[in-house]
Amino acid sequence: MQKTIYYSDELNDEFSEAKIKSKVIDENFKYERSGLWNLCSFVCQNILSVPIKLGYMKFKLHHKYVGKKEAKAFIKQYKGGMFLYGNHTLDFADTFIPSQIFYPKRNYLIVNGENVSMKGISWLVEMLGAIPIPSFLRGEKIENGDGIKATQNFMNAIEKRINKGYTISIYPEAHIWPFYTRIRNFKDVSFKYPVKYDMPSFCFTNTYQKRGTNKYRVVTYIDGPFYPNKELKNKKEMQKDLRDRIYETMVKRSKNNNIELIKYVKKEKY
């Protein structure tokens, strides 16, 4: 039988099965590491993890990209960094899919603090490219912490990686809704980065499509590049305009879903 999930808040409800208490991400969090750490991170990201990612995507998700050839043609001419935006409907597979779009470019992922709070493997998550959002920016209370300094460290980490020509993936929906077949409304806050650094963006939309009887495959549509519209009068308008163009593209691509594995129903208010 099809599973049904009831939701009340499209922006803030979280349906990930992983229940992890986030550690505080403050000014003491190490966004920058030594040369040996960076070497090990590169090996984990671009060598050791690749067969696992490709195997999982092929045999578990029966995955397919649409538009990857065109995207790869773009980076033959453009060597700089860029931002990737996607819909958040898978757990750890959401770290696999964007990392292979522009491979062998290194891909980093902006995440919530829970992702780097798992006992025993938080170091590995960081090596694989996780950049956690400071607790201050998430509106969490920090005792004896410097939220401004933490934010500066976070922004410096993004700037350093984007200036090296890497990609940074962002899930603007923020919360996981497993197998959701539409695009949730999301804020424009995460679109300040390509405006600030004057970098192109791509979006990728994961869809669920029939594969035989009661089976599915994940098909990811890649679109871009999207550039900030410099004809607008200020950065806030550029940020909203970029968000709207990417959102509309993802909504259009989401119409290719043709199987609903989980039904999401909004709770009635009485």
Image (cartoon, rainbow, N blue to C red):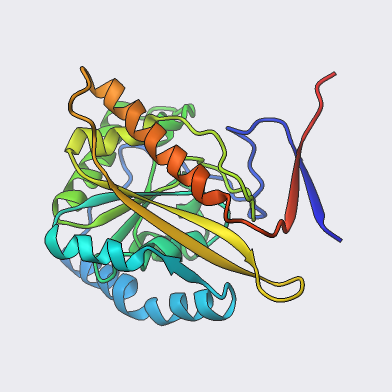
Choose top left, top right, bottom left or bottom right for residue 3. bottom right
Position of residue 21 relative to residue 94, above or below, is above
Query: Can the viewer see residue 256 in this picture?
Result: yes
Query: Does residue 101 appear to the left or right of 163 in the view shown?
Result: right
Position of residue 82 relative to residue 248, above or below, is below
Choose top left, top right, bottom left or bottom right for residue 126. bottom left
The C terminus, quarter of image: top right
The N terminus, quarter of image: bottom right
Position of residue 10 relative to residue 102, above or below, is above
Count how many numbered circles sit on residues in the image.
0
Q: Position of residue 105 (x, y in %)?
A: 24, 65
Q: Position of residue 216 (x, y in %)?
A: 66, 69
The residue positioned 19% from the left and 52% from the top of the image is 81
The residue positioned 34% from the left and 28% from the top of the image is 241
Which of the two residues, 52 or 89, is positioned nearer the viewer here? 89
Query: Can the viewer see residue 31 in this picture?
Result: no
Q: Position of residue 174 (x, y in %)?
A: 50, 41
Which of the two residues, 99 or 228, is positioned nearer the viewer here? 228
Query: Does residue 157 appear to the left or right of 179 in the view shown?
Result: left
